[in-house]
Every structure is written in C-alpha cells, then in structure tokens.
Image (spheres, rainbow, N blue to C red):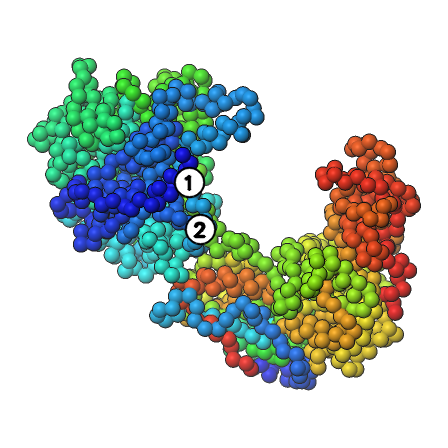
Amino acid sequence: MSDAVTTSASAPRSAGTPRSAWAPRSAWAGFAQAGRHGRPQGEAGVHLTLREGVGLATVIAADGQEASLGRILTDRLGWSLPEIGAAHLVGEQGLIWSGPGQWLAIAETRAGLHGLAQALHGVAAVTDQSDARALVRVSGPDARRALSKGVAIDLHPRAFRAGQVAITAIAHVGAQIWQRDEAPSYDLAVARSFAGSVWTWLSHACAEFGCAVNREPER
Amino acid sequence: MSTITLRRAEADSPPVPTGRPQAFRTATGGLIDRRRPLDFSFDGTRYAGFEGDTLASALLANGVRLVGRSFKYHRPRGILSAGSEEPNALVELRAGARREPNTRATVAELYEGLEARSQNRWPSLRYDALAVNALAAPIFAAGFYYKTFMWPAAFWEKLYEPMIRRAAGLGRAADAPDPDTYDRAHAFCDVLVIGGGPAGLSAALAAGRSGARVILVDEDHRLGGRLLAERREIGSRSGADWARETVAELASLPEVTILSRTTLFGVYDHGAYGAVERVSDHLAVPAAHAPRQRLWRITARRAVLAAGAIERPHVFGGNDRPGVMLAGAVRTYLNRFGVLPGQRVAIFTSGDDGWRTASDVAAAGGQVVAVIDARACVPPGLRRAAEALGARVIAGGYVSGTKGHLALKAIEVVDTYGSSETIACDCLAMANGWNPIVHLDSHLSRRPVWDAAIHAFVPGALPSGMVAVGAAGGRLTLAACLETGSRAGAEMAAACGFTAAPRDAPGTDPESTEHTPLWRVARSRGKAFVDFQNDVAASDVELAHREGFRAVEHLKRYTTLGMATDQGKTSNLAGLGIMAELTGQALPSVGTTVFRPPFTPVAIGAFAGHHRGKDFRATRQVPSRAWCAEQGAVFVETGLWLRPAYFPKAGEADWLESVNREVNTVRSHVGVCDVTTLGKIDIQGRDALAFIERVCANPFGTLPVGKARYAVLLREDGFVMDDGTVARMGETHFVMTASTANAAKVMQHLEFCHQWLWPDLDVQMVSVSEQWAQYAVAGPRARDTLRSIVDEGFDIGNEAFPFLACAEVTVGGGIPARLFRISFSGELAYELAVPAAYGDAAWRAIMQAGSTHGITAYGSEALSVMRIEKGHAAGAEINGQTTARDLGLGGMLAKKKDYVGRLMKERPALTDPDRPILVGFRPVDRGARLRAGAHFLAVGAAPSLAADEGVMTSVAYSPSLGHWIGLGLLRRGPERHGERVRAYDPVRGGDIEVEICSPVFVDPKEEKLRV
C-alpha cells in the first residue's frame, strides 16, 4: 500500500528522498535505551517499540471540500476518511482523526507520503509532520495499566478499542493515542521536543511491570 | 541539653528485649498468623507480635499502654480506637529519610523490624518535662494564644510562635529527601463501592454479579470491616468467614477490582473520586520498582457509600487516661487480634451495643468487673447476662473520674442515687453510640442531617449518583447493612444498564441498637476531653460559650475542636452536644461543620507522583541539544524549553566574557544559534493571504512569493500581542513565526479568529513548530558558511537571494529545507529550517562548514545582547501594556485595511503623546552598569509616582560599544534624544544619570543586513 500514494499521485519516487550523508537522529535518542528495564523477573509486562522514520502529515480539508477529499482518498488510495475519534489504518498506513476536519496521515516511511499533497491539491492542505512527533508503540499484558498512570481516559475494551483514537494528555504533555489491536497495543504520539520528559515518565510508569524496549528495524 | 545530643543517645542505645513476651495475647483466636512472629521496636525496646497485627494491637499484646503525649498539655495518652479515627496513638514510624510523624499506630501494619517512636515528649515518654503545661492548664485554655501572646507584636514571630511550636508538636518530619517513589493512576468503573464491610461487600457482589465494572475500595488490608471485629453470624457461619467467601467470589469476577489498603479520601465533581493506595507501607522498604503509595483518580458512573460508622467516646474527667478505650475497639483487639486490652475490664455505655463487649471480654479470658449504663432502664436480658459473668451492673450511673498515673488503675463511679465508689480496673470500654461517616458525602458542600432515631448525623442530599448504605447511611444493624448494601449494588448496576437483582440477604443473629446518648458527664472530676488530639476539653467548649463563640464555625476556630489531623472524627458531635446543652437548643439546631478532603492525611508525595524534582514539569529539548551538551553549554529555562544560554570556553572567567566573545565573533565572522523554540505556523488555503491581512497590523498584500516580512499582531484591545515574520512560500502557502513565549498563544489566537470571527475564510493552519529545527546563521561570513550546506543548484547570493528572501531548498544532499534571509542580530543572516530529525546533523555540518570562517555557537544571551544593540523590542517591551506606537512601530501599521485591534488602538489613552515610547539609553559615566527595572526621573526631581517618566526594560553590556546600553519606555522619548535623565533603582540602590539616544546602537543605516 505504501506505493499507492506515490504511484497514484504520479510523483517521481525519488523526489525529495534523502540520499544524504546526514544521519537522522531519533526523537528518542539520548533518552531511550533498548533492552530490559524495571522489574527484571518474569515476562516483561510492557513492550515499548520506538517507531522511527514513520511518515506523518496533517491533512486539513479545504473549506467545503470534505466530501471531495473523502472521494479522492478512496478513489486514488483506497483510504476512507475516519469519523470523529476513529483511526482507519490498513497495515501501518492510513488516516487518524485529529480534530474537526483534520486528520493525521501515516505511512511506514517518510517516502510513503510523498505525493499526497499533490494528490489532494485543492481539496486539502497537507503538511509534513514526519519529524514533529515522537512515536512509541506500547503493548503487552500490562500496557493498559501502565498507560492508565498518565492517560486520564478510559482504555477498558468496553470504552476504547482498536481503531479508536484520542487526543489527550499523558503526564501533562499533549498526546495523541490510537489503539492498533486488541492485544492490546497502542501507538502514542507526543511532540518531539517533549520526548525526554515523556520517556522519563513512561519508563517510571512501566518499571513495576518489567519493560522491554526495542527499536523498529531499519527500513 | 540540646535535642541533637538526645537523638544521638537514642540512636546509641541498643534495643532492649522485654521480659514476658505478649503477656496480653489470648491463647487462641484472632485473625493473626501465630506461626509468623515479627520483631519490632517501640522507643528502642524490642517486642514481638504476629503477622496480621497492627502496631497498636502488638503494643497492647505486650502490655504497652502509654504510647504518646498529648498536643498541648503533654498528658500521657494510650490507644483509643482500632481504626483510622485514632486521635491519640500517633507515632513516628521508621527512621532516617523514611521517618513519618503522626502515623496512627492503629492502622500501621506490623512488619519484621518495624521501628516506631513516641513523639511530643522530652526527655522520655514516661518522664515528660513539658507535662508541667498541665499545671498551667488555665492559661492554655481555648483561645489562649489570641489572648496571651498579643503584645508586643514583634514578639510573635521571634519568640512566641517558635516557643509554642516547640512545645506543641506533632512529631518530626524526616530531614532527608524521601527515598521512595509514588505513582498515580486513573481508573474508571460503573459502580464504585466505598468500604468493604458487610454493606460494601454486599453491594459489590450484587453489582459485580451483573457484569458491571465495579471497584471496591477499603482502607484495611483485609476486607470485612466490623465483621472481623465482632463475633457475629451470617447464614450460620461466622461473619469473618462470610466476608472471606464473599471476597473470594468478588475476586473471581473479571470486571471487579478490589483495592485494599486504599483510602477513598475525597469526592469531587462529576463522579470523580480521589483515593490513595498504600502499596508498600506494610513492608520495611518497598520492593524494587514498586511505588510506596499510589494515588488513584477514579471516575465512577455510580457510587455506593458504605464507609461505616465511628464510635463516640464519653466525655468525663480523665477520659484520656491510657486504658480508656472505645468499646468497639476493645472488641476489635479481642476478636480480630487475640489481644486482651486489660485483665480487668469495666464498661461504660449508654446503649445496648456496649453490653456486647462484656461477653467478648469473658470469652477471651478477661474479667468484666463492672458495666455502668447511663440509662436507668436496662433490658433485663443484658443485665442477667452481665451478672452471670460476675460483673457489677450499675444502671443510671456514670463514670466521673479515673485514677492511675501513666495507665488506668481504677475508675470512680457514681450510681443513680449519687453515691460514688472506686472500682479497680485496667481497661475501661466506652460505648456512646455510633456516628455514620458523613465525611465523604459532605465533601461537595452537602450538609448532613440529624437522624433522631439513631441520635446522629446521617447523609443529607447526596452527591449525584451516590447512595449511602449500611452504617454510613444510618442503618446500624448487620441485617440492615446486608440488605441495604445488596439492594443498592443491584440498583446502581441497573442504573448503568446492567441486569441485576438483589438477592435475599442471609440471616443474622439478633442485635439491638437501642441507645440514649450522653454528651458529657457534667459532674465529673478532672479534665474531660472532647477532642483528644487537640486537647480540647469540655471546659473549653464552656469557655467558648461564655465568650460568645457559640456558632459551630466559631466554636471550631476558637477552641480548635475538630481541627487536628483526625478532623474531629471522634470529637465533633460531643462538642456540638455540649454546646446544644449550654445554649438550650436541640442538637440539630446547633448545626454541624462540614468536612473537606482528605478523609485521612495523604502524603504530598502521593499527589506529586512522578512529578517531583526535575520531573516537576515537562521540559522541551532543542534539536541541537546533544552537541550543545557535549560542548558544555549552559542551559536556561525559557518556559518549558531548555535553551543553550551561552557556551563557556576554557579560560573564560565568567558568563559575560563568554557572551562578549560570542557577540564579537558573530559581528566579525559568523555564529549559529538554535532558534527552533520560535513558534512556526503553516497557513494554507485560498484565503490565506486575506486571513493574514486581518490578523496582522502591517500590510501584506504586496508580499510576493519568495519573500518574508516582519509582522506585528495586535490584540482585540489594540495592544501588541506578539511579533514575528510571515514568509510566502507559495501562492496560497505561508509560514508565520511567533516568539518562543507566545507561540501557543498566537496559535490559539489564529484558530479563534478563523473559527469564530471568519469561519467563511478558506484557510487551513497547523503548528509546524516541532517539525522544523531552525538555526540562525549570522555574521559577515554567514553566506560563506551556508554555501557548502545548501545543495548546489540553489543560489543564495545577494542578488538571487536578497534580504528578506525565502525559499524551499535542499541541504546535505537532498534533504528538504527552508531558507529565510532574516536577521535579528543586524548582521547578514539566514535562518535555515531542516526536518527536526536532521537537526543534529545540520547543526554539526554548519559548525564544520563554519570552522574555516571562524564560526561560534551562540546562545540566548548573545542573541539578546545583539537584539538590544539593534533596538528590537522583545518580551520585556512587548509586555501586554505597549502599543505599536509605544514600540516605535506605529509607522509600519497599515492605513488601508482592517485588522484585529485597529479601532481599539485609537483610544485616547493609547494615542496620548505623553505615553512612554521606546528609546535607547547609555550611562553618562560610560563605566557605570545599567539595571533593567530602573525608573526614569528628571535630573534633580525627588522620587515620587508623579515624577515617574518611564522604566528601563532591557539592558546589556555591549561588546560592540564597550559599555552598558539599555532600552526603555520614556515619556515622549523620541523627542528627547540627547537629554539626560536619572535611572533610579531603589530596589538595588542604583541611581545614575543616563543619556537618551536612538534605540539602534549598532549599524543604524542597516548596511550590514543587505550585503
């Protein structure tokens, strides 16, 4: 699916793709370390996967263009526009509701969203946010308990399920959180500059359950 | 002798083992584990107890009666209760950094090695020098410090208050930082059940069986409430067994959460509740990675209040003598802990309930010496049963006094004919009725109401969604607890959409709660205490009455009745009862004070949770952080941001030397500064330009694609809100910057303007502050430095890319970036924005590229010096009280368009020619230092508000000029260049003459910008 955006938007695949010697630095660099943390005994209750290099873009419908936006997304990309509080993801890409008339487009790589702006020209403003967020996937049997220490929303399966998103705060930092599956696993996005503080909180919150931190493999 | 010597002496003396271990422990019985003995120490003496004990039960098992000294009179005090209402048995628990004062021994679970000390005594618990206070009791009566320490006023702070604080203490806090961690958590449920006694367990079971999400909270580590303390039967098994079975079923229900060792301390609006879980307080030290306590914020759709009731003491002379206890507590120690609180027990009751104590004492092997009932008429069955145990029965009598120095030896009893006698006993059990716990339901300012049937306040109008059951609802019998609990649990679950029906409550053994309260024994000998913890006696209530402090709120403040850490749990009603008697009113007409959270004290650490020390609030880190930290940069907090302030180099004496070097290097060569903290807003849409025209006060209609312009935003009221830049990246695509401090406010303002003022405009905006790392590269060699950063094919020369140009470029071999030719320093300068992940690489590349051009990194200090040298207004000038005209920006405001603040800025006061306007200042004596905050006065004028002509807003040492310079707002400033005024700074003793000049100190013709 990640090819769909570029091919249907008929943008050159290489456009803007860094061939640079400059190395990107993870939002979590200097804060998070891969490995086992907190309680050392038994299975880790929480798994934290640092998500790197993910493509993100804000999509805001132009005045009165929401219907057209939905149509174009469906026709060209096979995506559907999520209703309030929903995340429509196929694999690792799709759209996540972010506010009235506003969505976060997500793809596995930065390149995955190249061409989106062009495809939506005239019906939506597309703004690259790939570097604006620090992303971490929180999963494992104690994921809910760990998150409940900072998130003031009800994550019980009767209240919040896979495919749902909330814009809330975690440990006093603005956050967007969407549930990926019923395992459960959640993706947590915070503003990049807050990564250090959020990490300090997250590792403290997970310590009693035992916590396994790993990085996503390079793509 | 100093307290320091004393502490050392305490620490040096090794704990002494006692003679007969646990002499007051019964042979069998109790919910303790006799196979698990535990060692503990109290005041340095070693004792033994069992797992399942509290510190109080273990002390009583060892015959320790005296556990503390009272707050004001230093009277010997023992253990009154067996629960969280305890006013007397407050100890310092643990040692060193974990020492916690005012811990109630009655709820402190025993653990191996527990260490406790009595408090508020000197030099020892048995010989307390300050017990002389009791001799001076008349001067310590209610309101004593209002009367005694009135004069001279200066003595209060220096002498009286420290003296009183030393004498009237409640233990010592730890003097080292708390080594433990605390946690916070949020929980949600359909039905919250507060209290795990018979009513709460029934409610939780009825609700839980329906499939509703239930949270059951109880402060004890073992659920069952009074069922653990009484010998009761439920459905042909013991109450304790019924509780155990019920808890087992609850634990098997997947949607039921049991939080034991958890006190629900507060009720808040919209179904929010606060609770504190003592995760590790029953252990010597928390397990690795476990918090000491956890604060829960519970949101519940419905709540069942089943918090139970608290027994009332009798008010009579010497009722505070160690050995005088609540009757229910006596039964708790007997039945739950297998401890005889005394060998010879007397009972003083005013209702049927107290008589239950007699058979429990006898069953445990103690002797019941007497039962004194204040009622003349006693049910014959009770009398016969007590007499069968060999007890004297005195109906219509009362206890008038107690004997014994540090522990009870005898009581004085007056019978119904007025003749008195002395009865030897070592324990007196008081039963004076029960008060439903109305604390939680009155947290939302709802007042309890008087229930004449049980002679107590019961919940009035309850907070929405809450119902009170069992004793907390004024239904004191066990049968009623089971029945009301089960019914409420089912109803609350049904209200949440679950199918639930109450089941028939199992049968219980019969009981009677007949009771006629006795508010005090009027003719008693010695001090009769109402509030044990605050040492408020019946005589203090009389004094308050005599002196006119009769309203309940006055009574409370004047006597401090109910104001101690126990919030008057055992004392409030007696105080009100006595006041009712004195004023000849019925008790409900006297009224009651209401309770506030927390129900019991909560450690501040629990509220803070993770957020203490450096984690008190979040910090934001700049993209160049790693390099800056490697270079030893000094960081400064700017709001939540940590910005590099300056970069000290070896050999530099102080910050000023470093900053001067940074400024000089930028002005002569090149420097780079992380300006990522600026707010960046992406604005797109067909009407983007129209929108910008309306929110900015200066004109933008002529701004071509590829150009940036300075922007001023006004508030609706005409004052300046912020300044920044707007760059036109495309026909309908703009990027606006805002100052670091106002980034969020400007974003909010723009969204407000779009959503409420002009929703018809087709404009889309989003913050991109976090997306882009942005670096200012400034100085004559800035272009030379950037040439090797910006990819070939982009011409950044002066002709192709002049001052105020902007463009999308690529850097470092294909990385998308934005370049702006804007300058805050007054030098040839660019701001380069790169995707934040490449911020670190870009910074290092710039430093590398600039090394041949003599580059320096510069921080926010040098940035500030250079903006003052250039006369640019910043936060100190754009302070919410200045107009564009005040800041010298009046000339750039648009004449031909409408914009936010246009009309309001024309108000007469804002256009007054006498308003202070931005100008520059230099000291007449060039060696003098300027101070921001100094006020301007005419030379020779006496300092007064009327003579005030303005204020110095920003100062800096200018390395370019070699002396201090300042910016300030001065009345008619621009007309007065060359004049001298006084800069008067009484706060720091500054008073110098300064010369008024142009605010632009460096390169006033702006030649350096455009090269």
Q: Nearer the viewer, mark 2 or mark 1?
A: 1
Q: CA distance from mark 2 to mark 1?
A: 21 Å
For this view, does A65 lie left or right of residue B726?
left
Secondary structure of residue under mark 2:
loop
For this view, does B385 lie left or right of residue B773?
left
Residue B728: give x, y in percent of width and height: 78, 67
- Which badge, 2 or 1, comes first in the chain's sequence? 1
The residue lying toward the viewer, choosing from B993 and B1003, is B993
Q: Which residue is mark 1?
A: B4
At horizontal 76% and vertical 70% (from top left) the residue drawn is: B855
Density class for disc 2 (Cα within 10 Å; few <14, some 14-19, many ≥20) is: few
Residue B853: give x, y in percent of width and height: 79, 73
Residue B529: give x, y in percent of width and height: 32, 26
For this view, does B939 lie left or right of residue B227?
right
From where the camera sits, is residue B454 visible? Answer: no
Give the amino acid type for the residue marked by disc 1 in the picture: Ile
The residue lying toward the viewer, choosing from A173 and B210, is A173
Q: Which residue is mark 2?
A: B178
Density class for disc 1 (Cα within 10 Å; few <14, some 14-19, many ≥20) is: few
Q: Badge 1 sits on which subunit?
A: B
Work out whether B266 lies above or below B392. Answer: below
The residue lying toward the viewer, choosing from B21 and B428, is B21
What is the quadrant of the N terminus of chain B in the image? top left
At horizontal 47% and vertical 71% (from top left) the residue drawn is: A213
At horizontal 36% and vertical 24% (from top left) the residue drawn is: B132
Does the CB distance between marks 2 and 1 fall below 8 Å? no
Write down the quadrant of residue B88 in the picture.
Answer: top left
As drawn, the label of residue B357 is none
Residue B181: give x, y in percent of width and height: 43, 55
